[in-house]
Image: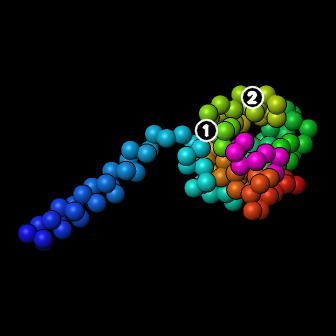
Amino acid sequence: MTRKIMMIFISAVLAVAFTAPAGMAGQGVAQKGPDGNDRKGKYTYRKVYKACYKRGEVDSKTPVISPADKTMAQWKRLFEHEDFEDFTEEFGCAQEWKNLSQDDIVDIYSYLYQHAADSPSPAKCQ
């Protein structure tokens, strides 16, 4: 009898373990943010502004805003809504932001979030 109960318990645990990630797949970028690759995000973020500079939309190859310009909560709020219109109006490069993949956006979010002003390791774009 106890073996049967143990098998039911293990089956239930495995069922939850394998179905939870599938149910979370539709969540927004902000939920995935800190799980992205922040090193790749830094590279992609800089690449966006270099491409934008080549087109002549901005005056500098380096991004106008650095991760330390906002707190972790401010970055989370921006990426939760996945509405970058205000961000691109203020800092430019709307065309480049529209062409980014979801993975690239998650990586950039991870970089900005993990190096925000109130993070353990704030960073400035140089």
Alpha carbon separation for disc pair 1 and 2: 14 Å
Quadrant (top left, top right, bottom left, bottom right) of the N terminus: bottom left
User: What amino acid is labelled 1 in the image?
Assistant: Glu
Q: Residues within 10 Å of mark 1 (few under 14, many from 20)?
A: some
Q: How far from the left and from the top, in percent, is residue 73? A: 69, 45
Kindly tell me whether residue 44 is visible in this rendering: no
Find disc 2 in the rendering and name its residue: 86
Q: Residue shown at 81%/57% (left/top)?
A: 123
Q: Secondary structure at mark 1?
A: helix
31 displayed left or right of 39: left
Give x and y (percent) for residue 67: 78, 50
Residue assigned mark 1:
80
What amino acid does circle 2 point to? Asp
Report the residue at 62% width, 57% height from top: 37
Q: Which residues are magenta?
A: 68-75
Between disc 1 and disc 2, the foreground one is 1
